[in-house]
Image (tube, rainbow, N blue to C red):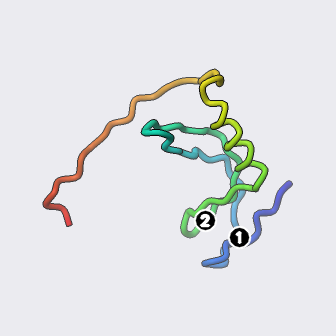
Amino acid sequence: MYDYGKWHICGERTAKKRIQQDFWIKGKLIVFEGVPAGVCPQCGEKVVKAEVGQSIAALLGELKRLRKKRTMTVPVIRCPRDVT
């Protein structure tokens, strides 16, 4: 078991969770599910081990060859210009 330790900003102990991680690659949204990470229970910040990050980077490099599990539709809402 990997110990993510305490979050460096607030000092809270990170909790081990499986998260959803999103990436925008060349204008397309790519979603990884079930990514092992440490998550701060106070602020929600996430951290992954270097090996996990390297694995994700390798998978992104092979994106065209990967068999996608599923696709999803994502709504897009434009923020009005008068919102400051």
Per the model, the C-alpha gap separating discs 2 and 1 is 8 Å
SS assignment at label 2: loop
* The one of 11 and 66 positioned closer to us in this rendering: 66
Q: Residue at x 60, y 65 (%)?
A: 41
* Residue most extreme to the left: 82
* The one of 31 and 64 positioned closer to us in this rendering: 64
Q: Amino acid at mark 1?
A: Arg
Q: Are marks 2 and 1 in contact (CB under 8 Å)?
A: yes
Q: Amino acid at mark 2?
A: Pro
The residue singled out by tag 1 in the image is 13
- The quarter of the picture where the N terminus appears is bottom right
* Residue 81 image point, x, y percent: 16, 57
Q: Residues within 10 Å of mark 1 (few under 14, many from 20)?
A: some
Tell me which numbered mark, 2 or 1, is placed earlier along the sequence: 1
Q: Residue at x 65, y 23 (%)?
A: 65
The residue singled out by tag 2 in the image is 41
Q: Residue at x 68, y 36 (%)?
A: 59
